[in-house]
Structure formats: structure tokens, C-alpha cells
Amino acid sequence: MFDKPSLFIRDLELVKNILVKDFQTFMDRRVLFEAKIDPLFGNTLPILKSQVWRHLRTKLTPVFISRKMKMMFYHLVTSCMELVECLEKATTDGKLSQYQ
């Protein structure tokens, strides 16, 4: 990465424009993860390039509309509360003491 010029942007409005509004112009950025070596991070939306990125973005965009996000929030809160209850029960029973 040190053999090519880079630009580090700190202005939040400019970052928002690049990552949201003008993303199609800036979508082919430098690859940080190889999909063959690290399939988890190598196939994420910010890493993908050109046509693969466009195809995946058109599939994912309808998922993140505000109505669906609000519906998912309820399930997220419910799951988190169940996790907290489970952890509280496990710590009061002494089951997690072996990991400390």
C-alpha cells in the first residue's frame, strides 16, 4: 500500500458523500482482504468490486428500508434481553466461574 498515493479523509460530510451518495464512483477501492484467503471479509460489500458489488447492493438495498429496520430492532432487543438473562443466570449459578 505504500507504493501508491493515498487520500485520508477526515471531513464527516465528505466521508458520507463518498460512502453513500457517490459510492458508485468510488466503489473500486484497494483490496484489503483476498476472498480466497479470507472468505468472510473478502466478500463483504465494501470490499467487492464493480458488477459483483452492484448485483449484491441491488439485492441488499430493500432489506435496509426504515420500516424493516424498525421491525428488526424489536427482535434484536428481545434477543439481547434473553442473552442478558441467560448470562445473569449462569453467573449466579457459578457456571462461568471456571472461565474467570
Image (tube, rainbow, N blue to C red):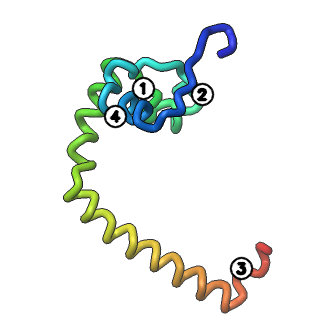
Give the side of residue 2 with respect to residue 52, left or right. right
> Rounded to the nearest whole Å, what is the CA distance between mark 4 and mark 3?
43 Å
Could you give the CA–CA distance between mark 2 and mark 4, rounded to whole angstroms? 28 Å
Which amino acid, by three-letter code, is at mark 2? Ile
Q: Amino acid at mark 3?
A: Leu
Q: Residues within 10 Å of mark 4 (few under 14, many from 20)?
A: few
Q: Which residue is mark 3?
A: 96
Q: What is the quadrant of the C terminus in the image?
A: bottom right
Q: Residue at left 54%, top 33%?
A: 10
Q: Earlier in the sequence, mark 1 or mark 4?
A: 4
Q: Position of residue 53 (x, y in %)?
A: 34, 26
Foreground disc of the pair 1, 4: 4
Q: Closer to us: mark 4 or mark 3?
A: 4
**Mark positioned earlier in the residue sequence (4 or 3):** 4
Label 1 to label 2, Cα distance in Å?
14 Å
Residue 20 is marked as 4
What is the count of numbered marks? 4
Label 1, label 3: how many angstroms apart (C-alpha)? 40 Å
Q: Which mark is residue 80?
A: none
Q: Position of residue 11 (x, y in %)?
A: 49, 33
Dots 1 and 4: beta carbons under 8 Å? no
Contact between marks 1 and 3 (CB within 8 A): the answer is no
Q: Nearer the viewer, mark 2 or mark 4?
A: 4
Residue placed at 38% from the left, 67% from the top?
76
Labels 4 & 3 near each other (Cβ < 8 A)? no
- The span from disc 2 to disc 3 (Cα, nearest Å) is 35 Å
Answer with mark 1 or mark 3, whichever residue precedes in sequence: 1
Within 10 angstroms of label 2, few (less than 14), some, or many (20 or more) residues? few
Mark 1 vs mark 3: in front: 1
Q: Is residue 45 something one can see in this rendering? A: no
What residue did someone put label 1 on?
A: 48
